[in-house]
Image (spheres, grey):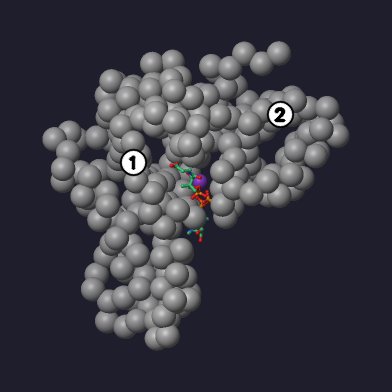
Amino acid sequence: MKLLVDVGNTALKTATLAGDVITLVNEADIPWSEIEEVLIAQVGKGELVAPLIARAQQLAIPYYQAKTSATLGGLTCAYPQFENLGIDRWLTVVACYHLYPQQSCVILDCGTASKIDVLNKAGQHLGGWILPGLDMMISSLVSNTQKVFSDDTSLFLPELGTNTPNAVKNGALVATLGALEYYLSQSDDTPVIVCAGGYGELMQQHLARPSTYNDILVLQGLMYWRKYQQFA
Ligand SMILES: Nc1ncnc2c1ncn2[C@@H]1O[C@H](COP(=O)(O)OP(=O)(O)O)[C@@H](O)[C@H]1O
Ligand SMILES: CC(C)(COP(=O)(O)O)[C@@H](O)C(=O)NCCC(=O)O
Ligand SMILES: [K+]
């Protein structure tokens, strides 16, 4: 059994991998006695994952940090400097390359930041966009203005706001949906739309087009990435 770890800038997600079955698990419930390898996708701070690494070292369990690459099998990375692409973004592309073979995909991964990445049916990552995540959009408005405020109760709706929290939260939603809609309006393709991340389900619910929500996309990418590695 392997341990998969997705270290974002807000949250750390952990799952076990047995065969090709990924099971999300709370950090406190990791079955360490059954773990024979730890695979880490890290874009967030090291202190989030340090306790896990320390435990693996203590138990002499090998651990590996996933890295982006120019190619992975038939998949190619859009960044000439591939090392600058967030490993989370790369792994969502790796996941979709395997989940939707020979199909074009647009990935909307909404976490601390919202990322859009595009993969064509030939397996070329075409690049994407990075936006402030919904919470970041809201907090930056509230902390940089005198009169803008939000709340924890208003919903995110694709409607005009009729009070300040609505205006702020609906604005964050439509700005993010708008980026995806902009890409789709410019594309002569009909890509598979895959939503991921903490706000992924919200996004998927407000998309007027067929789409899927995948809460383990980065972790699935980590599973596929592992198949291309030959560790000692
Ligand atoms: N149901 C949810 N579960 C987890 N995070 C959520 C949820 N709804 C919204 N969020 C927001 O999603 C973000 C965390 O998403 P995640 O993709 O784990 O982030 P990251 O990978 O950047 O750490 C936070 O901004 C959080 O407020
Ligand atoms: C944009 C990100 C911070 C998103 O991280 P997350 O929202 O998952 O915390 C991450 O993909 C990253 O560090 N990217 C590096 C820059 C780039 O991808 O061009
Ligand atoms: K993430």
Residue 63's disc number: 2
Nearer-N-terminus badge (2/1):
2
Dot 2, crowdedness within 10 Å: few (<14), some or many (≥20)?
A: some
Secondary structure of the residue carrying numbered label 1: strand
What is the residue that sits farthest to the front in this orientation?
81
Look at label 2 and name its amino acid: Tyr
Q: Is 60 placed left or right of 30 in the picture?
A: right
Point out the image quarter for the N terminus: top right
The quadrant of the image that shows the C terminus is top right
Residue 148 lies, in percent from the top left, at 39, 81
Name the side, left or right, on which 216 lies relative to 62.
Answer: left
Q: Where is residue 205 shown, x and y percent of the image?
A: 33, 54
126 with respect to 72 (left or right): left
Farthest-out residue, left: 188
Q: CA distance from mark 2 to mark 1?
A: 30 Å
Q: Which mark is residue 212?
A: none
Answer above or below: position of 21 versus 203.
above
Q: Quadrant of residue 213?
A: top left
Q: At 31% from the left edge and 68% from the top edge, which residue is drawn?
A: 171
Q: Is residue 24 visible?
A: no
Kindly indicate the quadrant of the structure image that contains residue 101: top left
The kind of residue on which mark 1 rests is Gly
- Residue 116 image point, x, y percent: 35, 44
Residue 132 sits above or below residue 27 on the image? below
Task: Assess disc 1: are there few (<14), some (14-19) or many (≥20) residues with their C-alpha within 10 Å of its C-alpha.
Answer: some
Q: Height in image: 125 above or below 130?
A: above
Q: Quadrant of residue 191?
A: top left
Residue appearing at x 53%, y 16% in the figure: 228
Residue drawn at x 27%, y 49% as measured from the top left = 180
Residue sitting nearer the eye, 21 or 55: 55
Q: Which mark is residue 128?
A: 1
